[in-house]
Image: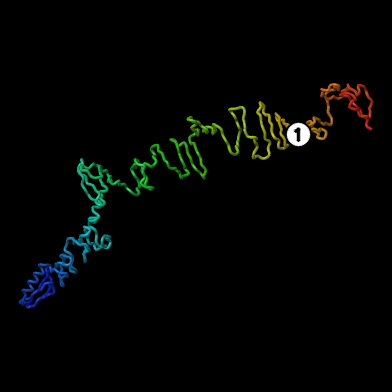
Amino acid sequence: MPYTINRTDGTAIATIQDGTADNSTSLTLFGKSYSNFGEALNENLVRLLENQASTSSPAAPMKGELWFDTTTNQVKVYDGSSFKPTGGAKSTSSLPTSPSAGDLWLDATNDQVFVYTGDSRSHQVNDKWELVGPAFTASQTQSGWKIETLGSAGGNKVVSSMYAGNTRVAILSKETFTPSVTQSGFAQIKAGITLNSTLGAAFEGSSSQAQQIDVSSTTNTSASVIAGGNFLRADASDTTTGRITIDSNLGLVVGGAQELEVTVASNNVTFAQTSQDKDLSFTMNDGGSTITPLKITGATGAIALTGDVTITGNLNITGEYNSSVSNVSTYDDAFLKVNTGNSEADAGLIVETADSEDARMFYDVSENFWSAGHGASYSQVIRLADATADGHANKGKVLKTTAGGNVTATSMNLGAVGSITYTDTANTGVPTIGAVATLSNEWGGSAKTVSTSQPTGGDGADGDFWFVREA
């Protein structure tokens, strides 16, 4: 009578006839009255005992069947399609072969555990092996975050310590406390991140904001990393050795009420005193005393200058010039020039008088001569060059003598009739109309007739007259 061999779930594996054996599985199954079944039975028991230890998997495995892979020294179970490791991490220096999702592998070189995901999105040692931990290799030593408990007077504190190469670089804490057991580089732990003081550590990179800046040092670590003490204070007086540039037309504002403004518009610079009717002064230290060379009065716009003023170029004045200190104005220039830049116009000197018409001396451009006068009545100012010695040829001119003291006139009217005696050699008077000229000295002491003969040197005396008759 044949045997029907069933699986655990009741499904049939094989039907074995009497006296025969079945090898459709990894074991030999016997029919009734099979000869020499003892040897095959014992081999089946040995195979079950050693989980069919071999370098190759069983030829006809059944789902759930165990096999000890002597190549990897792992017990594997058949899942209906292939043999998979039964569990635990495989410790090797190289990647396991034929892994299944969920398999663990201990990297014996780096002392790190990986899990096989079968997902190519993983980016670890292999594109399907995901690192479980630790994050550092054996050669890197303790690196990364580590959760620790530190004692303090206020009780134990749970913190996160950041290690790099087995050195604690920083401690992350939710509160400030002092460890009860000395922690190298961490005398006190602040709320937030506290850096190891023995490393001279500092935060590097960019930050959107900072609560405080340490100004205790002025030593820069590089040209681009500046010590806090080298920044100008906004809350206290400070000094800079560098140049300050305000790259804005809005410029500079000074004063508690922002009285002084320095601004720029279209490359034009404006200094402004913005407080109403307040002054703008420029002061200097003169031998230890403060002087004010320049003051602009806000209420009137008046400008006060103290000290000598040197002007290179033209001084143009719109309005009147007033001297309130001295009655005499002194100018060292060789000439004082007026009317510069104007078209032809009368210009000169005006002396104020009590009436409405002042006394004036000016150049009359329409006549091309100087005029002077008062009360709107002006006449030409005569120069020596305007006078003439010949009043007959140049009528209407003022007379002047020649180099010899002579004057020529067409006629001359005298105010009265006089007389002159020509015995007075010191009298320089001129006879008036009707004057009688008396010749006191005659030639030879007596009246002489007119002669054509010239007197000799011995004739007569000084002052004698001689009348000559032309031939």
Give, as a three-letter code, the residue at label 1.
Asp
Q: Residue 148: x, y in percent? A: 21, 48
For the point 16% across and 72% down, the residue is 59
Query: Can residue 193 be seen in this snapshot?
Result: no
Using residue 227 as the reference point, say whether residue 470 is left or right of it: right
Using residue 202 as the reference point, say whether residue 5 is left or right of it: left
Quadrant location of residue 304?
top right
Against 185, residue 320 (above or below) is above
Of 31 and 15, nearer the camera is 31
The secondary structure type at the circle numbered 1 is helix
Q: Residue 388: x, y in percent? A: 78, 33
Against 396, residue 226 (above or below) is below
Label 1 crowd bin: few (<14), some (14–19), many (20+), radius 10 Å = few
Of 48 and 375, nearer the camera is 48
Q: How many marks?
A: 1
For the point 41% across and 40% down, the residue is 240
Q: Quadrant of the C terminus?
A: top right
Colour logic = rainbow
Against 217, residue 397 (above or below) is above
Using residue 404 as the reference point, say whether residue 266 is left or right of it: left
Quadrant location of residue 11?
bottom left
Q: Residue 179: x, y in percent? A: 22, 43
Of 58 and 215, nearer the camera is 215
Residue position marked by numbered label 1 in the rendering: 386
Q: Quadrant of the N terminus?
A: bottom left
Residue placed farthest to the front in the image? 458
Q: Residue 98: x, y in percent? A: 21, 66
Of 263 and 246, nearer the camera is 246
